Structure formats: structure tokens, C-alpha cells
């Protein structure tokens, strides 16, 4: 139905074009048009919109029937092949001139994630994966860390809950997790967080109330690097509302910490 070799090469081309466009808009970051979405912490810039629009155009030129789910324009089309796009994951980092933002694109076929690419344009780091064929950083195969004890782990998280204005937040869990781990990082891009777990720079990442377009590509990349992705309960029923991605070795310990927060946060 779709030639995945061709699609993989196509994905590499369009994500690079998207990354270049983000860098181009970044040159005039101070005058970028910014709009508020749901809350005053939920922002979209003209760069997010332009990148998604370019990606949609490229995909539909090549695959006119395919479905697309994108952060800025939502769902379009109905087809077994669906491209899942976050044009700029980490918009706040991007807007503040930081490097921890990414373009995230996944291809799902018949409900399975088959291809994934996450590009951090300011770092020139391209993470890629194909189901069953491993995960790569700039063409070099990568593996998760071998940290076996949560206390030796460096984890990251995010606060989609606060940004969405929800009353139940990640803060109680954050306060419980923090003393049990070596340290925490907050880069601001869920897609990159998952890729950094995949490459062994981080040992785990958790977040609640995240969206599929933020994590689809990162989930495949992490699994292909030997990591584990689940909801807070260890299954996949509540993905992406709850996501825990780890090197696999500390997954159980993370779940033990998270366990007591499941009831109060849902
Ligand atoms: C963002 C995430 C971030 C999360 C934010 C938000 P955006 O995506 O990747 O890590 O904590 O709530 O969802 O909106 O910048 O694409």
C-alpha cells in the first residue's frame, strides 16, 4: 500500500526542510507573531503555523489521499496512512531563543507507528526510527542507558496540566519523584525528551495530559532504542493522556512512585 523505503527518504527530506524553516523564522524571533490558544501559557507562533502548512502541502503533493493529524490544523482526511505532525514541539523554548525544540513527524499505518523522525534544528540532531529496525541519532544506532536504579537516574517531565489550566497537576508527583532521583531536566519538548531517553542522555520521562502529536514519533524512537513506553499503569490504555517512557530498567520503580498519584490525578 505504501513503500516504506520511499516514505522514509521522503520523511527525512521534509523534516530537514521544516527544520530549516524554523531556523529562518528564528532570525526574527523578537518580531514573530504570537497568538494565545487555550490559556495564556498555550502559545502558537507564525513559525508553528508556517511549518505545519508547508509539511501538509509536501505530504499531500506526494500522498494526496493520506490523513494528517497536526497540532495547529487538527485532523484531515481518512486513510490507513496517517502522518502525525508537531511542527514545533517546545514552542515556548523556541520563542525564548533556546535550542530545546524540535520538529516531530510520525507515520502511522493501520494504527501502527511505522516511521518516526524528530529533528532538533538548533542542534542539528536528527533522531529516526523504523518499526523493527532500530533507532538512530544522525545515522548512528542508539541504545537506552543501562541505569538500573531510580536513584541514579536523571529524568525529565512537563506540565501540560498547568498550561491547560487544570486543577489537578503534576506537581505532587514531581515533589515525590524529585528526591528519589539524581536530578531532573525540563527542556520543554516532549518529543526531544523521549529521544534523549532513547539515546541514553536521560533515563526516563513522564507527563500527563500530553497530546499524541507531541509524543508519537518519540514513542517509536524510544521503543526502537530498547526503551519502554507505557501509561502510568504499565499498559497503553491511557496513552497519551499519561505517558511514562524509560530505559525499561527503571520502569517498575517509576511506576511504584507514580502509583499513589493515579487515583487522585484522574
Ligand atoms: C509542549 C510539549 C512540552 C509539554 C507542553 C507542550 P508544544 O508542546 O512538548 O514538553 O510540557 O505542555 O505540550 O505545544 O510546544 O508543541
Image (cartoon, grey):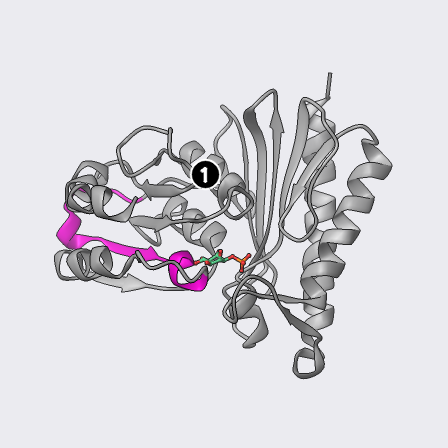
In the picture, measured across the screen, residue 129 lies left or right of residue 46, that is left
Q: What residue do we see at 24% from left, 59% from top?
A: 174
Q: Residues within 10 Å of mark 1 (few under 14, many from 20)?
A: many
Q: SS for tag 1?
A: helix
The residue that label 1 is drawn on is 219
- The stretch in magenta equals 145-163
Query: Quick one: which residue is furthest to the front in this view?
Result: 167
- Give me the residue at 22% from left, 63% from top: 183
29 relative to 125 in the view: left or right: right
Is residue 121 rendered to the left or right of residue 64? left
In front of the other: 248 or 63? 63
Rendered location of residue 233, percent (x, y): 26, 34
- Between 178 and 39, the residue placed more toward the observer is 39
Q: Is residue 116 visible?
A: yes
Instruction: Check if residue 141 falls in the magenta segment.
Output: no
Instruction: Tell me: residue 161, above or below residue 142.
Output: below
Using the image as rendered, state which of residue 137 and residue 235 is in the foreground.
235
Extreme residue in the top direction: 1
Residue at horizontal 37%, vertical 64%? 186
Quadrant holding the N terminus: top right
- At 44% across and 32% down in the image, what residue appears? 224
Say if the magenta span includes residue 158.
Answer: yes
Residue furthest right in the image: 61
Amino acid at each position: 500500500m505504501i513503500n516504506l523505503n520511499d516514505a522514509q527518504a521522503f520523511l527525512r527530506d521534509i523534516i530537514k526542510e521544516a527544520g530549516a524553516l524554523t531556523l529562518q523564522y528564528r532570525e526574527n524571533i523578537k518580531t514573530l507573531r504570537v497568538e494565545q490558544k487555550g490559556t495564556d501559557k498555550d502559545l502558537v507562533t507564525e513559525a508553528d503555523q508556517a511549518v505545519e502548512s508547508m509539511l501538509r502541502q509536501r505530504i499531500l503533493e506526494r500522498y494526496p489521499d493520506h490523513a494528517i493529524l497536526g497540532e495547529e490544523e487538527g485532523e484531515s482526511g481518512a486513510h490507513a496512512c496517517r502522518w502525525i505532525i508537531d511542527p514545533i514541539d517546545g514552542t515556548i523554548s523556541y520563542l525564548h531563543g533556546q535550542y530545546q525544540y524540535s520538529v516531530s513527524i510520525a507515520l502511522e499505518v493501520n494504527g501502527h507507528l511505522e516511521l518516526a523522525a524528530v529533528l532538533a534544528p538548533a542542534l542539528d540532531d536528527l533522531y529516526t526510527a523504523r518499526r523493527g529496525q532500530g533507532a538512530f541519532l544522525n545515522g548512528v544506532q542508539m541504545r537506552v542507558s543501562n541505569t538500573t536504579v531510580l536513584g541514579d537516574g536523571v529524568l525529565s517531565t512537563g506540565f501540560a496540566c498547568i498550561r491547560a489550566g487544570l486543577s489537578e497537576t503534576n506537581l505532587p508527583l514531581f515533589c515525590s519523584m524529585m528526591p528519589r532521583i539524581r536530578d531532573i531536566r525540563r527542556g520543554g519538548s516532549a518529543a526531544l525528551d523521549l529521544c534523549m531517553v532513547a539515546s541514553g542522555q536521560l533515563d526516563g520521562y513522564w507527563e500527563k495530559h500530553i497530546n499524541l502529536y507531541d509524543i508519537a514519533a518519540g514513542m517509536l524512537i524510544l521503543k526502537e532504542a530498547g526503551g519502554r513506553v507505557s501509561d502510568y499503569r504499565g499498559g497503553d490504555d491511557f496513552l497519551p493522556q499519561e505517558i511514562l517512557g524509560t530505559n525499561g530498567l527503571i520502569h517498575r520503580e517509576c511506576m511504584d512512585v507514580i502509583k499513589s498519584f493515579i487515583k487522585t490525578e484522574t
